[in-house]
Image (spheres, grey):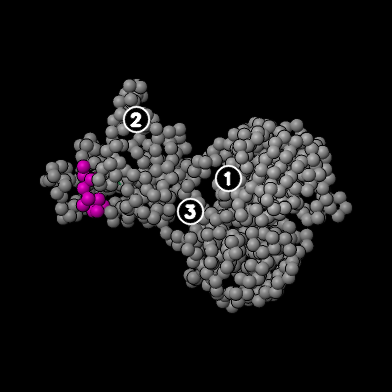
Amino acid sequence: MDRGEGLTIRVPGDKSITQRALILGALADGESRIGAVPRGGDPLATARAVAALGVEVRGLDGAGSEPVRIRGPGLRRWTQPAGALDLCNSGTGTRLLSGALAAQPLEVVLRGDASLSQRPMERIAAPLRRMGASVDYLERPGVLPMRIGGGALTSVRHDGEVASAQVKSAILLAGIGAGVPVEVREPHRSRDHSERMLEAMGAEVVEGWRGDAWSVRLADPPARLEPLDMDIPGDFSSATFFIAWAALATGQLPVTIRSVGLNPTRTGLLPVLARMGVDVEVLPRGAPGGEPAGDLRVAGQGAGLQAVEVGGDEVPGLIDEVPIVAVLAARADGVTRISGAAELRVKESDRLAALAVNLRRIGVAVEEFPDGLEIRGTGKPLSGRVECFHDHRIAMAFGVLGASPGCDLAIDDPGVADVSFPGFWELLARVERHSVAGAPHPGPTPAASPGAGRCIVVAVDGSAGSGKSTTAAAVARRLGFRHLDSGALYRAVTLALLESERGSEDVEDVTPAELDALRIGLEWHDGTMHVRIRGTLVPDEALRESRVTSEVSRVSAVPLVRDHLLELQRSAAAGPGLVAEGRDMGTVIFPSAEVKVHLDAEIRERARRRLLQRGRQPAPEEVDAEAARLERRDQRDSTRAIAPLSRAEGAVTVDTTELDPPGQTEVIVQLVLPFLTSVEYN
Ligand code: DC
């Protein structure tokens, strides 16, 4: 761990690529493996929609560790869903699915949440109708809910007035599905994720300028699509917030953002950053699913930022990053001009207005135009309250500005960041904490942030034989956290009492002074816990002796003993994180643990594991007998008056029946990752 090397972070997977992988996987012929799928609302909604269309989707509802597997039935093999498909807030999912549905001989109703039901659908409906599909609005013209009647389609050439990746993708998917050639022409190049993925799946897509228009043509649609095998790269737009953070804070460590999608239609911000004086180094790392990916390294900024002009052809390639350009412009030398960005008025908020209002409010001079902004950079302190307008990018852009020197901003609704970047505030806090930027500065204090410097606690409980101990230890090793084995502390008290004059008689009457005299202590070597009794290290075997095992449950039921161990257990929460294992971890000891996990397994499997632990392959009758014993023990455990075994509120239950130990570990590690979004030193 060399602090001089800088920080390495990861950002969530790209949702645009995820949505395409889910829908195209559902059209492929055979099983696709899609790893690192972000489990946010939009991809989930899309995946559930394809599942409702009769496509087998696995690995989605788990805790998020395993890859999603989609068994594509082939083109035109979807089946009539039982009801309307709810795309929740997923605009991309809705528009792409509409294209794919236009080629299926089905009648499907698509609907969404209140916000999605405001967004225009006619842009995709019109070309799909021209191809022969029927698209009807069920409530109000031009918006969801809408019904798509699909089937045989005819070839189409679509000349779009504005470049739109979603419209283009819908038409390409309709063409692929129906097996008819299609061509889309647009005034600028829009994002080409669909084209790349289709090519990776064996389709031939011909692209190029035709006069003033960018043409994308599917001349000879293939009869089948090959399944995908890919990991979703990190979202470039999410990564840009941390590039901006590094650019705004002076003199901090270099930051490396790992495995970010580097599709050239998305990275338009990079040349703009270069003109502003921000140096971003790109280290390529392959092209999963046809998508180039790589690490981004930003050196700590020393020199001042320069104002820029951004407009015209450049805008589609950085449309989502305009808020970033705007907050950097607030600190740049000179006047930054952004034009040609009228599209931003119909994003999650009127983003141009939201930027102008907030910049002005915190003390930056801004002029607003129908298609852009003029921002006069300033070095003076900036402070005030930022209104997010339900827009995640506004919240995060100002969050990053607020985390820079000389800024004191309050973000009114930090929670909106979750839409695209769960864990954003935690990551920002951790990155700040690890930076060596001069004096600490206030930065934003969103209510959602657990605050910098906090040790992340993972509370693990579970029934006997659920795999709790092995898994807790393995999770701690994987994450570089400490592992608190609370059972070992109760065992230590039991052993110490057995060896004292008291013996195991009347433990219920033990006094605080007697407990103090045992001098139970904890120490840590590489995250592994060791227990001392009266100053002497206790070997593990001694804690597992059968006389200890047979008395420990009585000792652990004594309230005074539990109180006695409370502070000692809490003191274990130091360093980056703690995996705390034991029945009351998520309830009494660490009620506000970041992650709470309850492990369980079918009773016969638990019985089998316990017998295996005793070193033999059990016969079925033995398993039955052990299962009966376990059942009685569960009953006792869950009804005992002191520290009953009960699931903590907010705990995630993980059924380990069909998981091997590495699988169990992985599930929990994935639950913890959003809290880390893995800041690590190089
Ligand atoms: O997990 P183990 O077998 O080492 O636990 C030993 C005993 O301590 C067992 O009877 C459960 C009890 N225990 C407890 O009451 N509270 C804890 N936090 C951990 C263990």
**Is 558 within the magenta?**
yes
Quadrant position of residue 240:
bottom right
CA gap, disc 2 and disc 1: 35 Å
Image quarter for ligand 1 equals top left
The numbered mark at residue 675 is: 3
- Label 1 element class: helix
Residue 102 lies, in percent from the top left, at: 73, 40
Magenta-tinted stretch: 554-565
* Of marks 2 and 1, the one in the foreground: 1
The numbered mark at residue 607 is: 2
Query: Can residue 529 be seen in this snapshot?
Result: no
Three-letter code, disc 3 = Phe
Residue 120 lies, in percent from the top left, at: 71, 54
CA gap, disc 2 and disc 3: 34 Å
Q: Which residue is mark 1?
A: 44
Find out whether the residues at labels 2 and 1 contact each other: C-beta distance under 8 Å.
no
Which residue does the image show at 32% across and 55% down from the upper left?
570
Residue 623 drawn above or below residue 134: above
